[in-house]
Image (spheres, helix red, strand yellow):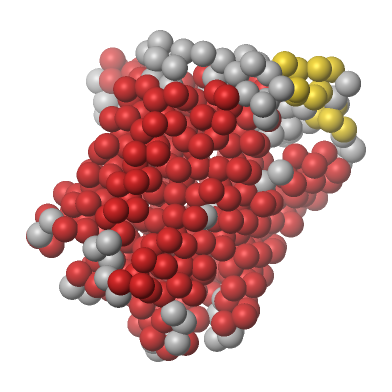
């Protein structure tokens, strides 16, 4: 993809991708014996495997932004309150924290590939349940999908790192773009799909089960072809949960995620409330999400070259919150600019939060456990963000007051980001069992 770039630009892009790849955390690093790298018989088999991982990544975000795009229709046709809508947008984020710790254990018992096969099947089921025009099934399907996404989030980076050691940078770029493309597609296309399906919000939500089923059929023979070797945890990390720096990294991760999922869950309804039509609001959210790709790939290469990342963390949250405030209050003619600004800041925050986990860890085992701590606690904390947006709107009948929430979240991200960015390492140690 770099053939039209000057050589120096191409090599710089490759270096940036390689640095971003080093921030991927392997959830199975504690496993004994270590999982084997697949023996690809042909280049085509390796390409198919890599394409499958990218397509799986694409399916890990539509659940969040598809419901957001149709939230006004769901509220109008079901009588769901703004607080109930907040619970709906919060539920999958909460499940990210609750189910993430299961991923390494499932991988040890049945293998990462077969675990991902189960994830895809249940993700498709959960997404399809949202199309049955039943509020209880809407919530159940959303929770099921959220739990599946949690496990996929944890296992995919390790597979990318393990199975494409010589092409990790390229695969990281494709993986990152697929995550953002999935969220952007759901934000921008769900409303047009609803109109195409006769105005049914439920069918439009369930339509996102189709790409998950397509990937399942592609992944099925590859997952079943892998021989399962039962593994066990051969290492233990002690002292992590008592470490102050580990908590700063975790709270930085959680609060920046709260901002991110406020965008996923509520930006489209906020823009529609301001006067944009549903399709345009969805496209604005898509633009914001796709702008995240740039800083997701660029920020790690800048961060690792700096001894201290505190200023970078504060700068990125300032940009992200400024973008949100612009989307709330600036003239509608400027929303495209503010969408890009917000995406740049938010994408950088997502990337640097993961980078902090690696930079603050003395070894890969501590990094894996710190990642588990940051995702488990962080996502449960992040779930509060979308819930509070719904509560604020329910009480005030306006989205303007959510600006206070965004600023407070931004201050929290800046405080813990400053602490997490210091050139220190967590005081935890790895013990061989």
- For the image shown, how many numbered marks are present on the structure? 0
* Quarter of the image that includes the C terminus: top right
Q: Is residue 191 above or below residue 98?
A: below
Question: Which corner quadrant of the image does residue 136 belong to?
Answer: bottom right
In the image as oriented, which residue stretches furthest toward the front? 395
Q: Is 70 left or right of 400, judged from the image as shown?
A: right
44 over 364 or under it: above or below: below
Q: Nearer the viewer, residue 103 or 37?
A: 103
Asked if residue 131 shows in the view, the reply is: yes
Q: Quadrant of the N terminus?
A: top left
Decide which of 146, 118 is in the foreground and name it: 146
In depth, the one of 371 and 413 nearer the eye is: 413
Residue 310, percent from left and from top: 37, 22
Quarter location, residue 49: top right
Q: Is residue 20 visible?
A: no
Residue 369, how many percent across, how many down?
Answer: 68, 30
Q: Residue at x 44, y 49 (%)?
A: 258
Residue 62 in the image: above or below residue 200: above
Q: Where residue 88 sits in the image (x, y, percent)?
A: 51, 69
Question: Is residue 5 toward the left or the right of residue 101 in the image?
Answer: left
Q: Position of residue 248 (x, y in %)?
A: 51, 29
Which residue appears at 27% of the width and 25% of the height?
5
Which residue does the image show at 84% across and 46% down from the upper left? Answer: 110
Instruction: State the residue at coordinates (60%, 59%).
Output: 146
Please state if 252 lies on the left or on the right of 149 as rendered. Answer: left
Q: Observer-nearest residue: 259 or 243?
A: 243
């Amino acid at each position: 993809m770099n053939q039209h770039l000057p050589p120096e630009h191409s090599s710089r892009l490759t270096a940036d991708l390689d640095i971003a790849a080093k921030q991927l955390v392997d959830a199975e690093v504690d496993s004994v014996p270590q999982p084997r790298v697949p023996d690809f018989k042909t280049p085509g088999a390796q390409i198919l495997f890599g394409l499958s991982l990218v397509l799986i990544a694409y399916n890990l975000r539509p659940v969040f932004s598809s419901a957001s795009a149709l939230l006004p229709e769901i509220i109008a046709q079901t009588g769901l309150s703004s607080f109930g809508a907040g619970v709906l947008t919060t539920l999958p984020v909460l499940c990210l924290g609750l189910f993430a710790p299961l991923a390494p254990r499932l991988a040890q018992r049945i293998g990462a590939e077969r675990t991902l096969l189960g994830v895809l099947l249940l993700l498709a089921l959960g997404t399809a349940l949202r199309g049955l025009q039943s509020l209880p099934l809407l919530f159940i399907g959303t929770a099921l999908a959220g739990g599946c996404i949690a496990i996929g989030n944890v296992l995919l980076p390790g597979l990318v790192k393990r199975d494409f050691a010589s092409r990790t940078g390229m695969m990281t770029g494709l993986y990152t773009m697929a995550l953002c493309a999935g969220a952007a597609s759901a934000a921008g296309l769900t409303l047009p799909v609803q109109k195409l399906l006769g105005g049914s919000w439920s069918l439009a939500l369930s339509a996102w089960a189709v790409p998950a089923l397509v990937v399942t059929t592609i992944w099925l023979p590859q997952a079943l072809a892998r021989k399962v070797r039962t593994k066990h945890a051969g290492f233990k990390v002690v002292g992590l949960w008592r470490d102050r720096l580990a908590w700063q990294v975790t709270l930085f991760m959680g609060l920046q995620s709260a901002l991110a999922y406020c965008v996923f869950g509520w930006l489209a309804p906020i823009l529609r409330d301001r006067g944009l039509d549903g399709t345009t609001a969805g496209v604005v959210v898509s633009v914001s999400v796709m702008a995240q790709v740039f800083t997701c790939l660029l920020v790690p290469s800048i961060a690792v070259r700096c001894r201290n990342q505190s200023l970078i963390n504060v700068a990125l949250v300032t940009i992200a919150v400024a973008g949100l405030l612009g989307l709330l209050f600036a003239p509608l003619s400027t929303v495209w600019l503010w969408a890009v600004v917000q995406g740049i800041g938010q994408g950088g925050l997502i990337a640097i939060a993961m980078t902090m986990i690696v930079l603050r860890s003395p070894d890969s085992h501590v990094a894996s456990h710190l990642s588990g701590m940051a995702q488990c606690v962080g996502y449960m904390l992040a779930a509060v963000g979308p819930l509070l947006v719904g509560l604020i709107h329910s009480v005030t009948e306006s989205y303007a007051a959510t600006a206070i929430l965004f600023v407070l979240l931004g201050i929290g991200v800046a405080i813990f980001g400053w602490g997490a960015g210091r050139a220190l390492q967590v005081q935890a140690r790895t013990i061989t069992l």
